[in-house]
Image: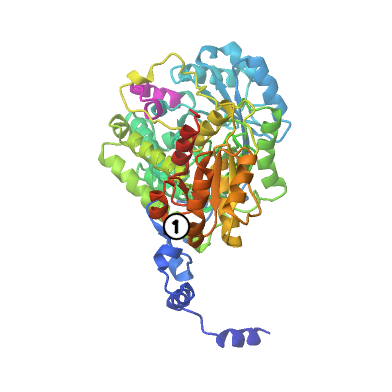
């Protein structure tokens, strides 16, 4: 049998890369290869349409093993289990305790408590942790940065009083003063001197970390993947510098850092990001000369993104967060927090939190994502993405170091300017539908109403602080869907829903395609759209539109036929409704000369066009 197989293979010549390129060029029929098939990413590198073994042979990432330096393939050698984490707002200790004990019976094995600074005292912690086995459950805490050291002392005293084995207590105290400087522009640099004391408080707890890099904030502000990656490494290195210069052992310092990173919808790129992050962080920590390679492991907690979540068609948020969770799980992170699908417009309820938990449990119990270490390893595509992201992320890291380190770059506004510019660019892309948000700027639910839902404003406990007087630049960001949501809510609140009527005529294929395009376009503002099978004359179509109470009449036909139909339809309508031509025909100048001024097509800025239509319709 083996001889037959060998003979069979020997009879076929293996195609070369050039052979593939030649065949592709033939199939493209003269079209430009780079324009048609090369993906020009936002991350600073291009992605070709195919890879071959020869591309990967030059890379070093496939040579590493799971659980070994530089940990590109993960920190675990056996299995790919991660912790299912749920965060709980602990305004009231007893209520938070009851909720924590309940969710621990529902598949959660990692708890995150957000405690207001004013609640930090021994009695509160005693009540909060009552009945919770701190050796069996990972515990994570977040509080006001100025009260974090007090909380650290209270926690360690509690663990000792209860007689817990210090080697079994695991979790984190997410203390990250730099985050306030990055996001709010506040000067909290004086608090950084507490860092060595934070480490001292937990030095006897090998599985408990107490300094965080909350780079998830950049993800939720719209940062590109490579920006989050590069700044995460620079951010972490700032803490390593600060701690080691204060006399903290490098291995101890590294073992107390945890990275809270976001994960967005770009499935393979996000998967590769976590692999690249471990690779870069291991190389950085190695330069501090820790006693063991184990100190170079990066502990990553992944949070599904809020930036791409939507208020309208909110169940689509489940699809987004599910693919994001898959990316993080396959990448081998330490724990995952799935943001409930309704988190952007209401306090998550029991249903949405249950769904969020079950999204992870499904991947474990039904899809077995926890069984195989780094299943993407060896994929030519993923290995190339990992290396490319690491290369570009390292450039960002070096650029920050040239400016004196991450803290100095933040004080100079370099990081904030970079992320803010990206956010503006992404909002512009969404306005033009170059970046899609399913259910918002692409294929919206035509009949959906907000039903009183409104975006939740900041609930970070920063009320009463005037950030306009902050000494440093803040990061200013809104979710990607926010502009469309504001537009659509204004239409609802106006008390009159504009009716857009499709006057379909002429070429069957073109009129149907343009009607579908126009319905999706105008429904993004919450307009009522009325499609039609077609009319024999424009007069018949206009009459039907007016009978339907149309505020907008959209002429849908082929480019060639617009020269025949557009002007007669416009004149017959005679200003009784807004007239729109679906497309950008060659005769557009002639149509404009006749008084037609509204055209919608793929090159339009959808958001600005709809704002203009709102103004014309008297919706402010």
Q: Nearer the viewer, residue 122 or 445?
A: 445
Residue at position x 72%, y 26% in the image: 102
512 horizontally vs 282: left or right: right
Residue 33 visible in the current orientation? yes
Q: Is residue 247 above or below residue 269?
A: above
Q: Main secondary structure of the magenta part?
A: helix
Q: Position of residue 161 (x, y in %)?
A: 61, 17
Does the magenta segment cover residue 2?
no
Q: Which residue is mark 1?
A: 585
Q: How is the image coloured?
A: rainbow
Q: Nearer the viewer, residue 433 or 369?
A: 433
Label 1: which secondary element: loop
Q: Which residues are magenta?
A: 181-200
Residue at position x 64%, y 40% in the image: 547
Residue at position x 66%, y 51% in the image: 371
In the rendered image, the quadrant that contains the N terminus is bottom right
Q: Position of residue 475 (x, y in %)?
A: 39, 31
Q: Nearer the viewer, residue 16 or 336?
A: 16
Q: Position of residue 48 (x, y in %)?
A: 44, 63
Residue 82 visible in the current orientation? no
């Amino acid at each position: 049998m083996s001889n037959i197989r060998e003979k069979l293979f020997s009879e076929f010549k293996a195609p070369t890369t050039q052979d593939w390129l030649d065949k592709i060029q033939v199939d493209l029929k003269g079209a430009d290869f780079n324009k048609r098939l090369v993906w020009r990413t936002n991350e600073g590198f291009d992605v070709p349409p195919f890879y071959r073994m020869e591309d990967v042979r030059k890379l070093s990432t496939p040579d590493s093993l799971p659980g070994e330096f530089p940990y590109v393939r993960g920190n675990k050698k056996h299995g790919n289990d991660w912790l299912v984490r749920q965060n709980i707002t602990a305004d009231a200790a007893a209520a938070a305790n009851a909720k924590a004990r309940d969710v621990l019976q529902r598949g959660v094995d990692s708890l995150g408590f957000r405690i207001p600074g004013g609640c930090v005292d021994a009695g509160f912690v005693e009540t909060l942790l009552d009945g919770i086995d701190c050796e069996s459950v990972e515990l994570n805490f977040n509080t006001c940065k100025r009260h974090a050291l007090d909380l650290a002392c209270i926690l360690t005293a509690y663990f000792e009083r209860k007689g817990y084995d210090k080697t079994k207590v695991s979790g984190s105290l997410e203390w990250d003063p730099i985050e306030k400087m990055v996001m709010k522009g506040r000067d909290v640099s004086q608090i950084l001197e507490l860092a060595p004391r934070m480490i001292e408080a937990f030095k006897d707890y090998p599985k408990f970390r107490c300094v965080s890099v909350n780079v998830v904030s950049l993800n939720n502000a719209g940062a590109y993947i490579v920006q989050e990656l590069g700044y995460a490494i620079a951010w972490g290195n700032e803490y390593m510098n600060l701690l080691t210069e204060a006399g903290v052992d490098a291995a101890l310092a590294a073992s107390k850092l945890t990275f809270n990173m976001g994960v967005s919808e770009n499935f393979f790129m996000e998967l590769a990001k976590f692999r690249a992050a471990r690779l870069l962080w291991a190389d950085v920590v190695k330069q501090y000369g820790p006693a063991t390679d184990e100190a170079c492991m990066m502990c990553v907690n992944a949070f599904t993104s809020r930036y791409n979540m939507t208020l309208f068609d909110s169940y689509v948020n489940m699809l987004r967060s599910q693919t994001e969770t898959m990316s993080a799980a396959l990448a081998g992170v330490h724990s995952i927090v799935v943001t409930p699908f309704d988190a952007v417009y209401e306090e998550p309820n029991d249903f949405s939190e249950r769904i969020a938990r079950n999204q992870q449990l499904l991947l474990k119990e039904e899809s077995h994502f926890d069984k195989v270490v780094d299943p993407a390893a060896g994929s030519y595509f993923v290995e190339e993405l990992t290396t490319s992201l690491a290369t570009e992320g390292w450039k960002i890291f070096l650029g920050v170091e040239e400016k004196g380190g991450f803290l100095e770059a933040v004080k100079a506004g370099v990081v904030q300017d970079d992320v803010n510019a990206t956010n503006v660019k992404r909002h512009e892309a969404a306005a033009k539908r170059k970046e899609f948000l399913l259910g918002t700027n692409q294929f919206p639910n035509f009949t959906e109403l907000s039903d009183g839902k409104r975006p939740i404003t900041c609930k970070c406990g920063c009320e009463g602080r005037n950030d306009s007087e902050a000494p440093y630049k803040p990061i200013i960001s809104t979710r990607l869907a926010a502009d469309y949501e504001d537009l659509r809510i204004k239409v609802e609140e106006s008390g009159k829903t504009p009716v857009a009527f499709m006057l379909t005529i002429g070429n069957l294929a073109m009129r149907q395609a343009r009607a579908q395009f126009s319905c999706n376009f105008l429904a993004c503002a919450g307009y009522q759209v009325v499609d039609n099978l077609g009319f024999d004359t424009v007069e018949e179509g206009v009459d039907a539109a007016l009978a339907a109470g149309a505020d907008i009449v959209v002429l849908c036909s082929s480019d060639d036929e617009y020269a025949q139909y557009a002007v007669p339809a416009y004149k017959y309508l005679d200003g009784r409704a807004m007239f729109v031509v679906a497309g950008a025909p060659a005769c557009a100048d002639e149509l404009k000369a006749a008084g037609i001024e509204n055209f919608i097509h793929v090159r339009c800025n959808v958001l600005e066009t709809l704002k203009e239509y709102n103004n014309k319709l008297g919706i402010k």
